[in-house]
Structures are given as structure tokens and as C-alpha cells.
Amino acid sequence: MNKEKLTHAAVAIFALGAVVSTLAEGTTATPIPEPRMKAYLYHNYGSPNVLRIEEVTKPVPKDDQVLVKVRAVSLNPLDWHYMRGKPYLIRAFDSGLLRPTNPRLGVDLSGEVEAVGKKVTDFKPGDNVFGHRYGAFAEYICATEKALVFKPSNVSFEEAAAVPIAGVTALQGLRDKGQLKRGQKVLINGASGGVGTFAVQIAKALGADVTGVCSTRNIDLVRSLGADHVIDYTKEDFTKNGQRYDLILDMVSSHPLSEMRKVMTPHGALVLVGSTDVGDWLKPLGIMLKPAVAGFFGSQKFGSLLAEITKENLNALRELMQTGKLKPVIDRTYTFGQLPDAMRYLEEGHTRGKVVVTVSAGDEALPVNVTSKAQPVNTTWFVFLVGAIIVLVLTLPLVAALALNRRYQHLNPGKRPYRWGYYFSILAVIDGLVLGYILEAGLGVFVICALLYGVLAWFFAQRRHWAWIALTLLSFNPVIWVVNLVYLWKRWTEPTAGARIL
């Protein structure tokens, strides 16, 4: 009897174990789905048609991050430059040569904190914030504490999203790079654009006398922002009206630096923060280099600016908004599904203030976009350009150097020629011509540079060391400085060198 009871108990235990095992297997076989969200992605370079809403995994904040439910984002020229992959330098140094390595876009954002990491101390769920984070064109984004600040209560989410890049650019250009002081005269070239509308208000808050330059349709807007004077560039050229300014903040680069000098005080400054035409290839390098080179000549200061968004700068702008001294200007507002349309409008280049997109999680139907084909670099043109540079900078000077070397040996048998000195000095001539282009003074500077470097090259061919020194210094090329000076020292110490030095 006891044996039967033990048998029945064993069967019952076995059956119970089978049931538990089955239930356990059923539980593990059905994983909990990951939370999803919508975000804009682009997998090819091209027009706004490459932007597509896709379902992606909702991010989870790390220990030092904040999860933000995005309420609004704003668009910047930076966004459409990355979208199109132009100028091509962007592809070479950052975003990927043939297709984007990072398919996400967007930087400026505002929203509500949904969750925080365990090391976050500044924010808690429910806080309203604004700031910056790459990949902001999405329903949710994770950012560090340093990238966010509290949104002022008197500012909407749309207005707060308009601030980060444009506002910080204006602030740094005026206060930090331009060293603007109370009572100084400042000219804002491009006063009705995204950066310009912030710059006019910030300059007034800093106590400056502000002149804004804009088109006819924007005169009332710029004046309403606090500008003391407004110039309609369609009717008046500010470089020819006789006025001078302590600081010029230039967003459009519509005049050459030689003309801008005329409207700057003797110790005035110009800060270049943008251009309406950056080209497809190397023009951005010229835009950045021209102010740097121009700053070497005279007492006037020239510089370019790439804004650095910091928590301190965002807080400075937040305080200006709280006190009513700064009011973001919004040209148009689009819904999340209309973001490609917003990008098209931004690309037209006639926005008044900022273009903003509202983001409402879960209430947008997925738009059907036409996928555009990738727009890789024009391979033929790229190869031609690289080849032309190689011929110009390397091959032609080398051929010329060898020809001069042979000629010198023919005329002076038994004497040691300069050889590579010829090569590097010819490169210095090329540098001089490039300098003429950078200074934007037209054909006159090209002719002057060509004559100057030509005369120096002639005396150099006569083995005049002072001409070699001059060519070396005027090359503005540290590599040529080092190589030529070392080579010159060796030739200088030759027994017959002293007799040829003038």
C-alpha cells in the first residue's frame, strides 16, 4: 500500500513538473517587444525626398543621459548641407563619401524629460528643456545634462527649439569673437535671417548701437527687433554710405573684404559666420582662410566663427528670454510629417528668422516619400580637379626646377645648382597667386603678386640669397620655410657663397 502511494506521488510530481516546464518554455518563447518610435532617416544624399520616417528602437538613457520626449525641432543650413552632402568636403571629413555614415539628422530641439539616468542631478521627469543633440528629428532623443537647459516658462516649445545653433552663433560672434562693448556701433549683415534676428536683439541687450541690413520686405521686422538703423540692401550699398562700424557680424558674405575694410573703424572687427554661397568644392576653405589672412595686415581684426554650443551659452540665452530681451522669430511652423517640405523652404534661402517643426508622438501617419537615388561625387570632375592640383602644385614646378637646374649647369659648369631650392621657390610663387585670390582684390593683386614673385625669382636665379629668403618668407608655407632655410644654410656655408650675398 505504501508502495502504491509512493508511485502515485511520483507520477503527480512528474506531471506537475511537466506543466511548470511547459509554462516556463511558453514564457521565454514570447519576448517583450522593444519600445519603438518614429525618426527621420536618410540613406542617400540628395533632395528632401531622401528624408523618410522610419520605425526605430526607442533610446534608453545611459547613467549620465536624459531621455527627452521631443516636442519641437528647428532646421538649420547645417541640416540641408549634410542631407545633400555638399560641399563635398563634408563627405570627405565627416559624413561619408558616397552615402551618409550616420542616417540621422537634426540638432536643435525642445521637449519634456521622460526619464533620467542614475547619475543625472539637474533634471527630473516632467521638466521642460531645450538644447542640442545630433539626430534630433525624432520623437525621442537621449542627451547629456551638458546639452540641455530648462525652458523658460514664457517661451513656447517651438520658440525654444529655434534657439540653440542660431542663438549661440549670434552670442559668440558678438560677445566672444567680436568683443562687443556698450556704446559701440555694430552692423548686422543678414539681420532678418536665423542668426541675424538673434544678433540684433543680443547686440541691443549688450548696449550697442545696431544697424541691420536686410531686404525691403524685412525692414519692419528688423526695426521691431530693436535695430536703431535699417539699411535696405536692394536700394543702398552700406559699404558706400560713409558710415564706419566697430564690429560687423556678417552672415551672408555679400561683399569682398577689401570693401568691408572701408566701413570698419581703424581698430574695428569683422566676424564672418556664414555665406549665401559656399559652393560644392573648396570654396568653404577660402571663406574661412580669407579673414585669417586679412587679419595679418593692418590694425583691423578679421575672423570666422564656428559656434560651440555649451550649457553656459544656452543658459545665457535662457536668461535673456526670461527677462524679455530676446524673442525667437519663427517664420513658418510645420508638422512632423511635413519636415521635408520645411527643408525645401529652408533651402530657398529667404527665411525670416527660423523654420520650426512640431513633433507629436504617435499621431502622424507615415508619409510616403519618393526615394531619390544617391548623388555621389562627380567622379570625372573629382579626378580632373585632383589631377589639376597635382600638375599645378607638383609637376609643373618640378619640370621648371629641372629646366632651371640644367640651364644653370650649362651656364656655370662645375658649380653646384640650387635644384630643390628652385622647386620650393616656384611653389612660393604659386602660393603668392593663391594669396592674391584669397585677398579678393581682383586682377590687380594677381598682377602685383606675379610681378613681385617674378622679380624675386629672377634674382634668386642669380644666386642672390636675399631673394631666396624673401621667397621663402612670402610663401606663407611652413614646410617651405623649414626646407628652404636648411638648404640655404648649407649653400651659405659654401666657400664661394659669401661673395654672392648682397
Image (tube, helix red, strand yellow):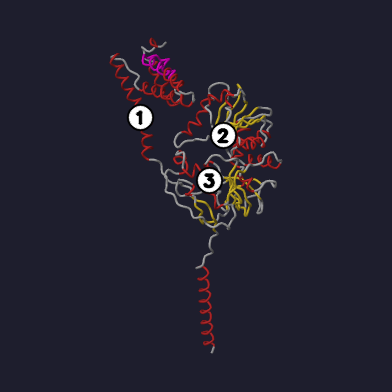
Q: What segment is highlighted magenta in the picture?
A: 452-471
- Percent across and percent down for residue 391 are 35, 29
Label of residue 343 in the image: 3
Q: Disc 1 marks which amino acid? A: Val
Q: Which residue is mark 1?
A: 391
Q: Disc 2 marks which amino acid? A: Met
Q: Which residue is mark 2?
A: 251
- Percent across and percent down for residue 387 are 36, 33
Q: Is residue 19 above or below residue 47?
A: below
Circle 2 sits in a helix, a strand or a loop, which is it?
A: loop
Which of the 4 image quarters holds residue 467? top left
Q: How many marks?
A: 3
N-term-proximal mark, 2 vs 1: 2
Query: For residue 453: magenta?
Result: yes
Location of the N terminus by quadrant is bottom right
Secondary structure mostly taken by the magenta-highlighted segment of the chain: helix
Q: Disc 3 marks which amino acid? A: Met
Circle 3 sits in a helix, a strand or a loop, which is it?
A: helix
Which of the 4 image quarters holds residue 489? top left
Circle 1 sits in a helix, a strand or a loop, which is it?
A: helix
- At horizontal 54% and vertical 87% (from top left) the residue drawn is 2
